[in-house]
Image (cartoon, rainbow, N blue to C red):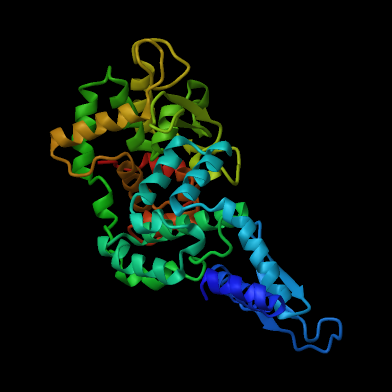
Amino acid sequence: MTTEEMMILLKSNPEIAQRFLDMTNKEAKKLYVAKMHKQKIFMLQTKDKYHNGNWATHLYVNGKRKVVYKTTEDEIYDYLYDFYKEQDDKTKTFDETFDCFIESKRDRGRSELTLKEYRRYHKLIPESIKKEDIALITEEELRKWFVNGFLSRKPKKEAMKKMLQQVKAVFAFGMRKGYCYSNPALNILAEDYYKFCDLSMRSNEQRSFSDEEIVKLREYCLNDRNNPHAAMMLVAMETGMRLGELAALKKSDVDTEYIWVHRQQVIVFEDEKCRNRKIRDLEYTKNEKANPRGGRLIPITENCRSALKIAAELPGESEYVFHHPNGKPIVKDSYEYYLRRRCKTLGIPISHNHAFRVAFNAKLIEAGVDGNERCLVLGHSMQTNERHYSFSDRRKVDNVRAKLNNLKLA
C-alpha cells in the first residue's frame, strides 16, 4: 500500500487503517527479530500453572544466558524488538570489536608481544568477515572460511587451535559488551579440522644438536672465551637452561654445588608498534608462572663448573653471570643472534637454544637419569619430558650428580 492509499484509508475509516498499521508493524517487528535473534521462541507446555501457555526464549545479556518469559507471543516479540533496537546503537563490525578486545587485553596488562601475536592471526581473517556487523556473522559463514580459507594454508594443529580460540574470544568479548548476542564459533571444534592440517612432525633428533655439532660449537666458544655470548652457550650445553633463564642468571644464584634457577628475562614493548622495548626479570620460570614452587636446582657437574669459570672471568663487573664489559646483562635476543650466526658459520642447520635443551635431556637419559629427576633438572612436567624430549626408555638411578659427572657430553 502506498502512502497516498494509506492517507485515503485513514480519512475514510480510521479504525480499519489503525488495525492495518498494527498488523504491518507486527510483521515488520517479527522480521526484524528473526534477523537478530538466533534462539528458539516457543510456547511453554508445563504443569506449572504460572508459566503454562506463556511464551519464552533465551537471550544473552552481557554474555550471560537468561530466560525471558512473556504472556503472549506479541509481548515476547515486542520485548525482543525493543531489546535489539536498543542494541543497534552499539553496532560494531568484527574488526571494531577486535580493536576493543585488544584494548581490553592491554588494560589487563598483556604484553605488546602477545598483542602482536593476536594481530598476526587477525590479519588472516578475510575482509568480508572483518567488515561485517559482528551480530550478523553466522556459524556457516565461519565454517566456510575455515575450510576454504584458513585450512588452505595447511596450518599446524596448534595454529588451527589458536586461530579458533582467538575468534571465539572476540565473539565472547562482543557478547559481554552487547555487540552481538551469540557466539557462532562456539560449536566449531578444532579437532574436527585437524585432519586437514599439516600433521608432519620433526623427530627429536631434528630438534636437537648432535654430538658432532656440539663439539664444533664448544670449540668455537672456547676460542671466543671473552665473549659473554660464548660463555652462555657453554653453560647452556651443560645445563639445558632456557634462553630467558640464562640471561637472567645472577652470580648469587650459583654456589659450589648447584645453580638455583628461579628467574627469567622478558622483553616488553610499550607501544603497539613494538618500539621502546624494555628488559625485565621475572621472579619465576616459564613453568612456574601459574604454579610457583621456588624454582629448581641444577647440579653443577665438572663440565658445567668449567663453563661457569669461563663466565666468571668475563671482563667487567656485574651481578649477572653473563654480562658486557660495562656490567649490563646480555639481552636474550642478542644471544640468539650470536648463536644463529655461529651455527650458520659452522654449517649447522639448527640455530636455537632449545636444541641444547633437547640434547642435554638425551644425555641425561644416556647416563641413566630417570624421568622424575630429569624433570627436576630441566623444570617441566613428566608428560612434557616424555613427549618432547625423550629418545629412549627411562632408567633408574641413585645419584643424579654422579651420573651427570660421568656423562661424556660430546
Residue sitting at the far right: 49
| Residue 240 in picture, x, y percent from top left | 38, 40
Residue 30: quarter of image: bottom right
Out of 372 and 205, give the one closest to the viewer: 205
User: Where is 64 relative to 258, above or below?
Assistant: below
Residue beneath the point at 32% across and 37% down: 237
Residue beneath the point at 67% across and 63% down: 82
Residue beneath the point at 23% across and 35% down: 340
| Residue 366 in picture, x, y percent from top left | 34, 52
Question: Is residue 31 among what the camera can see?
Answer: yes
Q: Is residue 337 left or right of residue 302?
A: left
User: Where is 122 relative to 20, above or below?
Assistant: above
| Residue 285 in picture, x, y percent from top left | 51, 38
Q: Is residue 214 left or right of residue 390?
A: left
Q: Is residue 258 left or right of residue 46?
A: left
Quarter of the picture holding the C terminus: top left
| Residue 186 in picture, x, y percent from top left | 52, 67
Residue 66: quarter of image: bottom right
Out of 281 and 9, give the one closest to the viewer: 9
Out of 132 and 403, give the one closest to the viewer: 132
Out of 142 and 220, give the one closest to the viewer: 142
